[in-house]
Image (cartoon, rainbow, N blue to C red):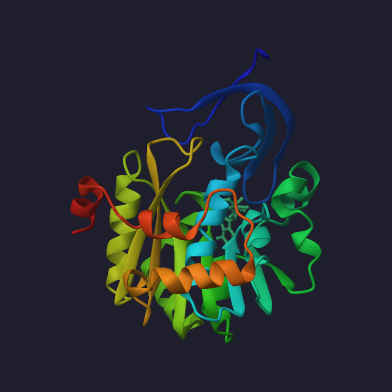
Amino acid sequence: MRNMWIYESLYPDIKIGLTGQLLYKTKTPFQDVRIYDTDRFGKLLLIDGAIQTTEKDEFIYHEMITHPVLLMHSNPKNILIIGGGDGGVLREVLKHNIKKVTLVEIDEEVINLSKKFFPTLSRGAFNDQRVNIVIQDGARFIRKTKETFDIVIIDSPDPVGAAKALFSKNFYIGISSALKENGIMIRQTGSTIVQDGVLKKNYKLLKAIFPYLAVEIAAIPTYIGGFFSFTIASKSINPHKVQYKTVLKMFENLDLKTKFYNPEIHFASMQLPNYVIEDLQ
Ligand code: SAM
């Protein structure tokens, strides 16, 4: 064990601590970015004091924010990722039979550093012919785009700093316009215990815009606070009405190689504990 303690500093009253060593730190025009090598979770990306991802548990988050929505859609071809500069979501999206994926990341430095320090996250995904990288604020991109998408994945940090705009009513109205009629969006909505306010607030905002919503939960060890949540929204697809056999067939046809996700987890993750159901009412 090395001596340095690394603490997440998102909140003043609760912190996750890991031992390890600092590999790199920089202040980009948008945020403070640090990369550590931890003893238990491998390399860790910290942005503005908040844990973004670690080599050891990244697969849970990246698979669960990608596969459920792509498999709920019968034919996803045009995908939009907002944020996601580490490349983990891109890697998972490219396992599907898609035509194009656009990744809109505000901070090019995160992409460059991730390619260098986290090659297993993107695994060459940034070089794929189907990938279109746009360096821009995701909120601005949504205001301006004329393109429509089958799937929108909002892989943003917590609602602080540059990411704040990605949690607003106007942004969600823009997402609704940028989605095709049978399009589906998903976003992370934080820990169901420690960040229950984030889930409640965003679920409410999305409910006023989209007729169909669902919440998935998964435990991600370095996202402190028990079950972590993802909120799914669509104008015409009810996630709870999608059939298990349809998802299974697509999963098998694609021969998807996953470490966490499978069609059983897909449906189990949308069964919520009572405290979450109450929060959403
Ligand atoms: N899985 C992570 C989490 O939940 O903490 C998110 C990881 S990914 C590294 C988040 C990315 O969103 C960062 O690279 C950050 O630069 C980017 N980002 C923040 N605000 C943004 C915005 N307004 N538009 C586009 N990208 C943004």
Quadrant of the frame with the N terminus: top right
Quarter of the image containing the C terminus? bottom left
Height in image: 67 above or below 261? Answer: below
Q: Residue at x 22, y 54 (%)?
A: 277
Q: Is residue 259 visible?
A: yes
Residue sitting at 61 percent across and 58 percent down? Answer: 89
Q: Quadrant of residue 252?
A: bottom right
Residue 139 visible, this orientation? no
Does residue 187 sit above or below 17 in this rendering?
below
Ligand 1 quadrant? bottom right
Front residue of 29/231: it is: 231
Closer-to-camera residue (132/134): 132
Left or right: 105, with 240 as reference point: right
Q: Position of residue 17 (x, y in %)?
A: 52, 24
Residue 180 picture location, percent across and down: 48, 85
| Residue 206, above or below 144 | above
Q: Is 34 above or below relative to 255?
A: above
**Nearer to us in this view, 22 or 240:** 240
Q: Residue at x 33, y 53 (%)?
A: 199
Q: How many marks?
A: 0
Give the side of residue 205 with respect to residue 3, left or right.
left
Q: Residue at x 34, y 38 (%)?
A: 194
Residue 92 position in % (x across, y down): 63, 60
